[in-house]
Amino acid sequence: MNEVIKCPYERDCGGCNLLNKKYNDTLDIKLKHVNELFKQANIDYKIKECIASPNHLAYRNKMIIGFKNLKGNIIAGFYEEGSHHIVNIDKCIMHTDTQNKIFKDFLNIIKKLHLDIYDEDKRYGLIRYLLIREAFTTKEVMVVIVTSTNIFPARSNLVKELRRLNPNITTIIQNVNSRKTSIVLGEEQKVLFGPGFIYDYIGNIKFRLGPKSFFQVNPAQALNLYNEVKRLANLNKDEIAIDAYSGVSTISAFIAIDAKKVISIENNKEACLAGIANLKDNNIKNVYVENEDATTYLVNEAKLHNSYDVVVLDPPRSGSTFEFINAVASVKAKRVIYVSCGPDTLAKDLKLFINKGYMITEAKCFDMFCFTKHIECIVILGLKGL
């Protein structure tokens, strides 16, 4: 498929800012952008390949819908890029028919039940967001209704009707977010139907997903990405690896089968607990989860003169730190696999690694977010002289 895709909301939404291009051309644009950043950072390496997503449309497994009452009419859709203005939509071609149907059914039901839409300025109303999470492998579906208060009139009627129209829904959860914030989910939640979670797989690794669980929105491409990390790590049963900024230990789970031991380092306690549960569900016993800042952990390991064979890092868009990169060199990691969702900070960090005696041996881009400007990169660095 390489024709230009048309979307009636493209101009207003802005989420898919490359939708006016042929898909293959978007890959070239992203690859060129990354290589230009490398050139600007004086990195003497040119990435030659951007791996296409297995699915270009309906690839996203999570939909978040915002609501607004505009002169008595309910506006429902996505926030316009860079603003807090909701673009009214009927469906999104980047989401599945299942997600789009649940969204439209939910909208019709809340209209029928005359439920109030939350007004952020007046801090009045009930319905704030709708989150739909679909497991592509198991076909389980989670619906999260975000309200401003735990008092939920007509709750049972809404759940009953939504389930009648969508019997494929596995669980429904009410999440309460009373804060004046753009963050979608609050801390309090109540299970209205089902177990309160769903299961999905990436490859043969099983993941239990709740409303707040991190999970790649493009799981088919995520499998390609993680398999590439596993290949580049090239671990053996005598080697120990570190998985830094590990989230729910996804990469740890993929590489553990080849390693003697993997240390999974994540500073978010909730993600650590989810990671431990995922490892247990998959009977993976050689991954050790550390609830610690990645920089702090590795700096301390360097002070103790400990060494590691492989370091995998998948930092946030803001990148890693000088102290972390310096510590990687101190623990004498033979191979470093850098997974990045921010090519600008990737280029900056790679320059630091190169200054510490590492050299790029292989790199690829992966199109994780089709028709957007975002791109995922994997770079492997080897320590010179090894």
Image (tube, rainbow, N blue to C red):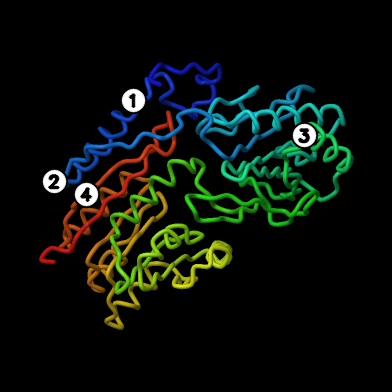
Q: What is the C-alpha distance between the residues marked 2 and 4?
A: 12 Å
Q: Which residue is mark 4?
A: 362
Of badges 1 and 2, nearer the viewer stands 1
The residue type indicated by label 3 comes to: Ile
Q: Is residue 219 left or right of residue 189?
A: left
SS assignment at label 2: loop
Q: Earlier in the sequence, mark 1 or mark 4?
A: 1
Q: Position of residue 256 (x, y in %)?
A: 41, 65
Dot label at residue 44: 2
Q: Position of residue 302 (x, y in %)?
A: 29, 77
Q: Which residue is mark 1?
A: 24
SS assignment at label 1: helix
SS assignment at label 4: strand
- The answer to whether the residues at label 2 and label 4 have Cβ atoms under 8 Å apart is no
The residue type indicated by label 2 comes to: Asp
The residue type indicated by label 1 comes to: Asn
Q: Residue at x 42, y 53 (%)?
A: 316
Q: What is the C-alpha distance between the residues marked 4 and 3?
A: 51 Å
Q: Position of residue 249 (x, y in %)?
A: 48, 61
Residue 290 in view of the camera? no
Q: Is residue 329 left or right of residue 86?
A: left
Of badges 2 and 4, nearer the viewer stands 4
